[in-house]
Amino acid sequence: MVFGGRPALSGVVSPGKALRTGQASRGFTLIEVMVVIVVIGIMVSLVQFSVSGSRPEEKLKQASARFAGVFEIAAEYSMLNNVELGLLVDENTYQFVGYDGVRWSPLADADLFTAYSISEDLKMELQLDDLPIEEPALYDRSVFEVEEEDSFSEQEEEKVIPQVYILSGGDITPFSLTFSFIEDLVLDEEYAYRVTGLFTTPLTSEFLIDGKVVTGAEDDE
């Protein structure tokens, strides 16, 4: 189109169109930003592990760092979405589940929280007792227990009861999760990484040799 004998500039966008384009775009949510951060952290730890060689403690550090990062994202997810979450742990797998007011079930819209298996030569040990806790319980555990139903279906679903609760108010069940090598792996020293959460995030991580905490281990590369 020509105005006053001069062609219109093709690169000029009308203010109305620019406004509509700005309204259509949206920024990243906090949970999306945190997911990117933890993924970058995991990738960095993978690079560090490959560069540092075959030091066994690096493999434990990588596994514990991945768990701590995902747990803290789950805590943020719980608060932002006002939903109660739970942590399920067995010897080599952990998973986050959500509570819908009736039962615990996997979170369909969050792949990061699905069941994750650690390396076959590692194991995890969850501890809920003997922690330095002086405060009373933050919640009534019976609130989340699944009630018995009078009638049973032909294929009854297995009940899911988390060991650790992540509440939407920011509170968590006090716990520690220790990553170590399976007993079949013979080493000169017994290495482990222990991740601990006391009532709220962030979690803390400790490096242990023969059951004793080693200070300054995070700085030794």
Image (cartoon, rainbow, N blue to C red):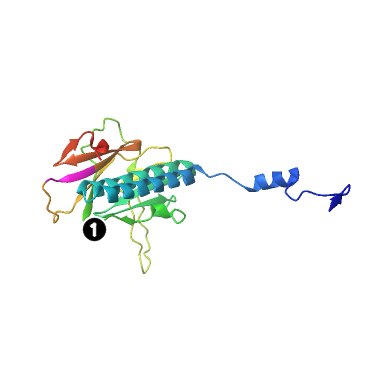
Magenta includes 125?
A: no
Q: Is residue 162 visible?
A: no
Q: Most extreme residue toward the top, as rendered? A: 134
* Location of mark 1 (residue): 120
SS at mark 1 in the image:
loop
Quarter of image, res 114: bottom left
- Nearest the viewer among 93 and 84 is 93
Q: Residue at x 25, y 49 (%)?
A: 59
Residue 19 percent coordinates (x, y):
70, 43
Say which of 158 and 119 sits in front: 119
Magenta-tinted stretch: 189-193
**Residue 179 image point, x, y percent:** 23, 47
- Kindly tell me whether residue 194 is visible in this rendering: yes
Q: Residue at x 37, y 58 (%)?
A: 149
The amino acid on which the numbered mark 1 sits, given as a three-letter code, is Glu
- In the rendered image, which quarter contains the C terminus? top left
Count of numbered tags = 1
Determine whether, in the image, residue 201 is placed left or right of residue 212: right
The residue shown at (66%, 44%) is: 22
Q: Residue 89: image x %, image y %?
A: 29, 51
Q: Residue at x 42, y 44 (%)?
A: 37
State left or right for residue 84 relative to residue 209.
right
